[in-house]
Image: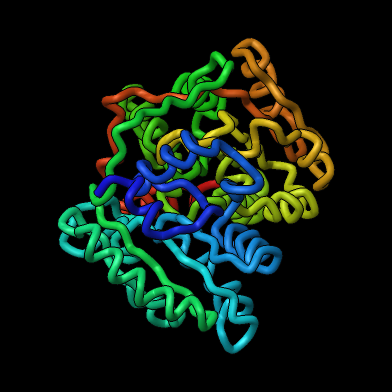
Amino acid sequence: MQVEKLIEILGSDFYAGVPDSQLKPLCDFLMNKYGIDKKHHIIAANEGNCVAVAAGYHLATGKVPVVYMQNSGEGNIINPVASLLNDKVYAIPMIFVIGWRGEPSVHDEPQHIYQGEVTIKLLDDMDIKSFVIGKETTEEELKCVMKDFRELLSKGKNVAFVVRKGALSLDEKISYKNKNSMTREEIIKHITAVSDKDPVISTTGKASRELFEIRENNNQSHKYDFLTVGSMGHSSSIALGVAINKPQTKIWCIDGDGAALMHMGAMAVIGEISPDNMVHIVINNGAHETVGGMPTVAGKADLVAIAKGCGYPYAVSVDSFSELDSELKKAKERNGLSFIEIKCSIGARDDLGRPTTTAIENKNNFMEYISGLE
């Protein structure tokens, strides 16, 4: 189905979301039509954030908003859906458009498998009536469903369209770029050259995939790395938990700007505990690049000021490899929590692979390795 038809049938003029590769036609259409526009389209930090912004839109206008996201974001909306939107509380109507990663019987990555199995069940448990859009779904069918959904929305209920892989299409193309010159893969090569055999916790998406391939190409063991293939936004907290319990070992966290924004409160906790042995690196390309390149607000946010405000004793931003190498070496030697923001370009190799080990193998190898460290 052409995404323009979906937009027409939904009939809303306000969208808030967290980008998803399954919904790339929708995301690209919204960026082409509105860009980032406070009146019509906001890309939020996390899915709960989207729900709250959309609720505010409804309170101010009386209209029904649309929130879009990957199904992994359902966990982030449970609280505001149950305690804010629900018709037993404020009865705020909302349309959800959800990309269905890990759909049963459709091959996907391990972090999506269980989430895919429970996608519809979670919506049912939240009293959200859902309809699945596939390649075979017709406009007339969708219009009939939307007519029924409007009855529910008028009663303060929520509804959801769950979108299968390849169900939406868009003829227009949009490319996302910034002015930064350093590529993420090269940045990670420089990080691993300095971190050496220190444990590394890497964030969701292409950063972990690139780290895996770098180890392969260097004939290095993968035991040094914990690849956070799911659980977006939590890598820094995982690194904190490791750092606290391995105080004599330098612990490196390779984070992304979208992930850091998603659960930014983690930085306040890290700053308060301030482990002397942790290096928190945020590779900032100002984009949700793994799911298509749509922008984050980190392109304008001062992450160094945020880190310092959260209590990090040392925070710096770099935009060249000479600066990066210098700061990595100083962080390696420093007895104190370090924060390094690295300005990065948007883009990755077309032939970038995925980890060939299972998540369980990754966990077991990592745990066995760090068990021998102090």
Q: Residue furthest bottom?
A: 88
Residue in the picture at 53% in, 53% down: 13
Q: Nearer the viewer, residue 227 or 371?
A: 227
What is the x, y in percent for residue 192?
A: 50, 27
Q: Which x, y percent locates residue 80? A: 60, 72
| 106 displayed left or right of 330 | left
Which sits in the foreground, 152 or 160? 152
Which residue is at the front of the view, 208 or 160? 160
Looking at the image, residue 181 sits to the left or right of residue 150; the answer is right
x 80%, y 53%: residue: 272
Locate residue 353: give its quadrant.
Answer: top left
| Relative to 152, residue 230 above or below | above
Answer left or right for 269 relative to 292.
right
Q: Can residue 193 be seen in the rendering of this structure?
A: no
In this view, 32 is above or below 93: above
Residue 127 appears in the rendering = yes
- Across and down, in percent, residue 176 comes to 47, 26
Q: Colour mode?
A: rainbow
Q: Where is residue 336 in the image (x, y as percent from the top left)?
A: 77, 38
- Residue under the point 35% across and 64% down: 161
Instruction: Kindly identify the residue that appears in the image at 63 percent across and 66 percent down.
Output: 58
Q: How many marks?
A: 0
